[in-house]
Image (cartoon, rainbow, N blue to C red):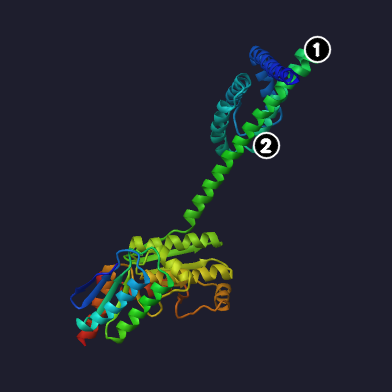
Amino acid sequence: MQVPILKQGAYLIATIQSALTDADIVQLRDALVEQVGRYRSRGVIIDVTALDVMDSFATGTLRDVAHMVRLRGAETVIVGIQPDVAFAMVHMGLTLEGVTTKLDLEEGLDHLNRNIRTTAGR
Amino acid sequence: MGLAQLRNETKSTSESTAVLLRELVAHLGQNRTQLREEWIRRITEGRLLTAMSKEEIFAEATSVYDSYVEALETRTLETLQAYAQNLSERIIPRGVETHEVVGIVLLLRDVLARSLFSKYHADTRMLNAVLDAYEPAANAIAITVAVGFVRERERIIRQQQEAIRELSTPVLQVRERLLILPIIGLIDPLRARQLTEQLLRGIRANRAKVVVIDITGVAAMDATVANHLVLTVESARLLGARVIVTGLSPEIAQTLVNIGVDLGKMNTVGDLQGGIEEAERLLGYKVGPLSEGMSA
C-alpha cells in the first residue's frame, strides 16, 4: 500500500496507515527524498503510530530517509513509536541513531517549528 | 460368574459403608453437645486458636462440627470446601497459623474416633467395619480443610506480592511533561521489565518530555539489569523523551563502565536534586527564590 504524503506548509507529513512491505518502504523513501526538493520543504515527519512491528529493514530505511533528507537540506522527525515497539527495537539494537524521534505528530511539529524558526530568524 | 460376584460384593461393600456412615452420623448427631464440648476442651488444652476468644471458638467449633457431620452424611465435600475457604478468609487476617487449623481438624477426628471406640469396643468386628468407613472420609475432610486454608494463604501472599510490586515502581509527574521514577530496593529481571513497561506507558500517558530515573535507593545491580536500564533509556528516546539517571552508587557506576555503556546515550547527574534541575533546564523552566520585594 502506498503511503500518502501530505504537504503542510514547509513540511511533508507521511502517515503510515498499515503494515508495509519492503517495497512500500523503499517507495516511501524515494518519494519523500524527491518531494523534499520539489516542494523546497524544511521538515519531514513520518508518523508510525499504526505500526506494531518495526523490523531491521524498516528501521534501516527510515534512518536512511532521515540522512538523505538532511543532505537535501531538511530535517526528519519520526513520531508515534509505540512503547512495546520501542523496547523491541532497542532489544534488537535498532536505535535509530542520529534521528530525531518524538512522541506524536503534535510534538514533531512543535520540534520542527522551534528548530526551523530559530534558523530562519537569524 | 466370578465377575458378577465381585461386582455384587463391591456393591454390597459400598452399600454397607453407606449404612455404617448413616449410623455413624446418627451417633454423632445424638452426642453432638458432649462431643463438641470434649473437642473444645482439647482445643483449649492444646493452646490452639489462641488468637480467638472462647465464644468465638465455641461458635466456630459448632459450625465446623456440623459441616463435618454433614460432609460425612452427604459424602460430598463441596459444602465443607466452601465453608473451609470462608473460615480461612476470616481467620487468616487474625494470625491463625496453619498448624492450628490442621490441629483442630485432626483433634476433632480423634475425638470422634474415640467416641466410636467407646461405643463399639465390645464388638471388634463391628468396630473395624465402622472405622473402615469412618477413616477415609475423615481423612478426606482433614485434607480438604488443610488444602483450603493453605490455598487461601497462598492467594493472599500472591495478592500482597502483586501489591508490593505495584507500589514499588511509581511513576510520578512533578511538572508538566516531567516524570520521576524513583527506584528503591533490589531489581530483579522481572521487576526491571515491569519498570520499563510502566515507564514507557507513563511517557505516553503523561506526554512526558523528560524523565528522571533516580536509583539512589538501589545498592547494586548486575550486568543484566544494568543493560536493561540502558535499553530502557534508549526506548524512552524513541518515544521522544529524554532520560536523566541520578543517584548512581559507586558500585553501579563500576558495573555500567564494565559493561561498556556509551555515555553519550545516557545522561547522568549526581543526585535527584541535580537531576530535576537539569530536567527543568531542558524543559525551559527557570526556578529561583522570589525576590525580596515579592516575598515580603
For label 1, count other residues whose C-alpha is less than 10 Å away and answer few (under 14), some (14-19) or many (20+). Answer: few
Q: Quadrant of the N terminus of chain A?
A: bottom left
Comparing labels 2 and 1, the label whose residue is closer to the camera: 1
The residue pinned by badge 2 equals B99
Q: Quadrant of the C terminus of chain A?
A: bottom left
- Does B26 appear above or below B216? above
- A40 on left or right of B178: left
SS of the residue at dot 2? helix
Q: Quadrant of residue B131?
A: top right
The residue pinned by badge 1 equals B123
- B177 on left or right of B225: left
> What percent of the width, then of the height, locates residue A17?
29, 64
Q: Quadrant of residue B24?
A: top right
Q: Quadrant of residue B242?
A: bottom left
Mark 1 or mark 2, which is nearer the start of the sequence?
2
Tag 2, which chain? Answer: B
**Callout 1, which amino acid?**
Asp
> What percent of the width, then of the height, locates residue B218?
54, 66
Residue B292 visible from this viewpoint: no
- Does B149 appear above or below B16? below
Q: How far is the residue under mark 2 from the one under mark 1? A: 35 Å
Q: Which is more toward the observer, A35 or B206?
A: A35
SS of the residue at dot 1? loop
For label 2, count other residues whose C-alpha is less than 10 Å away and answer few (under 14), some (14-19) or many (20+). Answer: few
Tag 1, which chain? Answer: B
Q: Residue at x 59, y 23 (%)?
A: B67
Q: Residue at x 66, y 32 (%)?
A: B143
**Callout 2, which amino acid?**
His
